[in-house]
Image (cartoon, coloured by chain):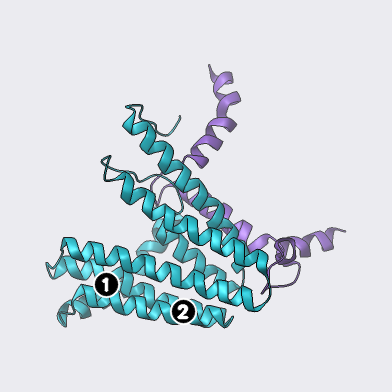
Chain colours: A purple, B cyan
Amino acid sequence: MKISRLLTWPIVSLWNALFWTYDRATWQYDLMVIAILAFVWLTPPTWLGDPTASGPGLVGWLLTLIN
Amino acid sequence: MTFTGAIGALCMFPLSALISVSVALRVHPNVLTFVGVLINVLAAWALALGRFTLAGTIMIVANVFDFIDGKVAEQLELRSAFGGFWDSVMDRFSDISLFIGLIYLYAQLGRTDYVMITALTMMFSVLTSYTRARAESVIVKCKVGFMERPERIVLFMIGAFTNRMAAVLWVICVLSILTVADRIIYTWRELNHDPIGTVT
């Protein structure tokens, strides 16, 4: 039972994220907010072809540092 | 208390003071709604000029009015069916104004791709509200989907203050499409007596 739950967990989580029924101020809502803010602030503007922002952003800066 | 709940509670302190002032002055809530819309048009103008920080600041002021109108109506016992209708229509007007400001900016910059992305985002943002309003004329409640107006407005402000409007538009666009789809599926299943909820 536990193994089957573990195996279906990613699919169930994806379904719950896509078919959103959670209220505000729940931990699921917080998690979604963190994911959105991470995308907005970490994605290099050049990857999205941002017409008003330029530069590599935090991810681009980290990649440059690693390379 | 969750992270977002704590931010909400923190923002309530200055707003409570403004609500008290409006109640003391007996400002009609419909007037507050209208003033909020006028200020939002100014924010749209700032967006059109590419002055994002100014636009973000104006958006904060506009949305303070938008937030307090309902609370003032409640405290002054002026809640009415027309007030709800007026508020809803003015919200759409504010939303569309902001998108038009961005469309103008991207058109000026010669970026047809982002003109299209903004137009698509605008279309699905309006559909998000429409699907719920229409659904609730045939079923009791249709409050599913993540990207509702408060989320949209906060994201707009984040995009304006941190100059990450492109990323914000992508997020609003994708999540608005999902929200519209959620509401269509939910309504279809409710009408076919096949309720759906969170899978555990």
Relative vertical location of residue A39 with respect to residue B77 in this rendering, above or below:
above
Q: Is residue B74 shown above or below B130?
A: below
The residue drawn where x is 69% and y is 60% is: A43
- Where does label 1 land, which residue? B16
The residue sitting at the top extreme is A1
Judged from this view, the residue extending furthest toward the left is: B77
Please state which amino acid type lies under the numbered disc 1: Ser
Proximity of marks 1 and 2: CB atoms separated by less than 8 Å: no
What residue appears at the point 44 percent right and 75 percent down from the top-left corner? B59
**Picture quadrant where residue B71 is located:** bottom left
Badge 2 amino acid: Ala
Percent x, y of residue B116 = 61, 62
Q: Quadrant of residue B167?
A: bottom right
Pointer 1 or 2: first along the chain: 1
Closer to the camera in the image, B48 or B74 = B48
Rendering coords of residue B10 (x, y %): 37, 67
Give the secondary structure at mark 2: helix
Q: Label 1: few (<14), some or many (≥20) within 10 Å?
A: few
Q: Which residue is mark 2?
A: B43
Residue B92 appears left or right of B119: left
Quadrant that contains the C terminus of chain B? top left
- Chain ID at mark 2: B
Say whether residue A50 is left or right of residue B58: right
Q: Is residue B168 visible?
A: no
Q: Is residue B21 above or below residue B148?
A: below
Residue B177: % across, % down: 51, 49
Q: CA distance from mark 1 to mark 2?
A: 24 Å
Give the residue at x 17% y 65%: B74
